[in-house]
Image: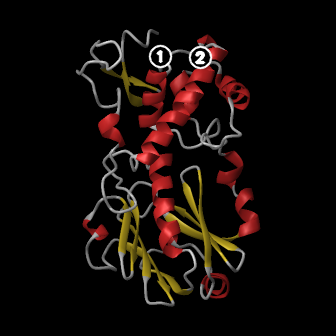
């Protein structure tokens, strides 16, 4: 599953390439569940519409159209988006489809633009999807109703973060920040990194974490995510950046996948354990349970 910085990297790449283009045709290739839209709606609201913006909410991409409809895109585990025109852009699961001739056997949806360029949605495992919805209805879909605030918004402060986390007072702090209803887009890599930065053991119960510690934790989440976006996302196996190149953030990780190496803060040997059902990296000295 991509994490928020990876999806934001994809969004930025698409924004530069498809905004202003006019859709000529959009169709599913052998996988209706990847494009679960009525043909009449596609013809009336997708085809011949202008792409006006590309947004992101949590880990979901939102391609807005002049028809006042929005294409909601979830890449899931193995999805990728490849733009082919005068230039080529590939983002997502790093298979040969990023650079090979398209469509290929992983192609699920083809969007053709009036200028002859194409946007391909490829997905080997067929878990991802592109849904066409009235823009006014997008905030009301189940996912949007449940997902928590965006961590990178300036308006999201400790004043809002702390009570949201404390709803999970009896669980571990790592499980709490991985909960997408608490805060959007924090995945395993960024949970480990931010908890290390805040000197909080991932297995500590939320009730045993002070408000001051939670405030520092939010600062660390924001810092780590901003850094990762600057570096093009993590290099966690399934994702490359908006130019089809691997992101570089993971090279600068302080604790994630550094088990057996020295903690960059205190020199103790980093350990890997399991918390909230996920592989978890900690410094046993800096992060005392």
Element carrying mark 2 = helix
Provide residue 187's location: percent of width, then percent of height: 48, 39
Q: Quadrant of residue 131?
A: bottom right
**Colouring used for the render:** secondary structure
Side of 246 where 138 appears, left or right:
right
Provide residue 147's location: percent of width, then percent of height: 65, 45
Which residue is rendered at x = 35% and y = 30% of the image? 256
**Observer-nearest residue: 88 or 42?**
88
Tell which circle, 2 or 1, labels the residue nearer the N-terminal end: 1
Above or below: residue 140 compared with residue 71: above
Which residue is rendered at x = 65% and y = 19% of the image? 169
Above or below: residue 101 compared with residue 269: below
**Observer-nearest residue: 116 or 110?**
116
Q: Is residue 132 visible?
A: no
**Observer-nearest residue: 69 or 55?**
55
**Observer-nearest residue: 154 or 142?**
154
Above or below: residue 255 compared with residue 251: above
Q: Which residue is mark 2?
A: 213
Provide residue 74's location: percent of width, then percent of height: 52, 60
Q: Which residue is mark 1?
A: 199
Which residue is rendered at x = 47% and y = 21% of the image? 202
Q: Residues within 10 Å of mark 1 (few under 14, many from 20)?
A: some
Check whether the beta carbons of the residues at disc 2 and disc 1 lie within 8 A of each other.
Answer: yes
Element carrying mark 1 = loop
Side of 250 where 27 appears, left or right:
right
Q: Is residue 219 visible?
A: yes
Task: Residue at the far left: name it.
Answer: 260
Above or below: residue 75 compared with residue 289: below
Q: Quadrant of residue 261?
A: top left
Q: Residues within 10 Å of mark 2 (few under 14, many from 20)?
A: some
Q: Between marks 2 and 1, how big is the CA–CA gap?
A: 8 Å
């Amino acid at each position: 599953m991509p994490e928020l910085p990876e999806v934001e990297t994809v969004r930025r790449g698409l924004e530069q390439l498809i905004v202003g283009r006019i859709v000529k045709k959009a169709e599913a290739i052998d996988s209706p569940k990847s494009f679960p839209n009525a043909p009449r709606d596609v013809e009336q609201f997708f085809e011949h519409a202008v792409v006006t913006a590309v947004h992101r909410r949590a880990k979901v991409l939102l391609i807005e159209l002049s028809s006042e409809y929005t294409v909601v895109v979830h890449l899931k585990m193995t999805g990728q988006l490849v733009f082919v025109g005068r230039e080529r852009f590939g983002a997502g699961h790093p298979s040969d489809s990023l650079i090979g001739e398209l469509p290929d056997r992983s192609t699920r949806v083809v969007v053709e633009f009036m200028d002859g360029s194409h946007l391909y949605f490829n997905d080997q495992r067929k878990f991802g999807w592109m849904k066409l919805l009235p823009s006014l209805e997008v905030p009301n879909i189940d996912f949007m109703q449940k997902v928590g605030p965006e961590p990178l918004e300036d308006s999201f402060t400790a004043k809002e973060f702390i009570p949201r986390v404390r709803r999970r007072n009896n669980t571990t702090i790592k499980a709490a920040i991985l909960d997408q209803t608490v805060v959007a887009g924090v995945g395993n890599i960024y949970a480990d990194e931010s908890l290390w930065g805040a000197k909080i053991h991932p297995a500590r119960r939320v009730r045993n974490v002070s408000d001051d510690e939670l405030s520092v934790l939010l600062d660390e989440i924001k810092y780590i995510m901003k850094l990762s976006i600057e570096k093009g996302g993590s290099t966690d196996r399934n994702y490359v950046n908006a130019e089809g190149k691997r992101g570089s953030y993971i090279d600068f990780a302080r604790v994630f996948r550094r088990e057996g190496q020295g903690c960059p803060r205190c020199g103790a040997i980093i350990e890997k354990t399991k918390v909230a059902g996920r592989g978890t990296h900690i410094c046993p000295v800096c992060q005392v349970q």
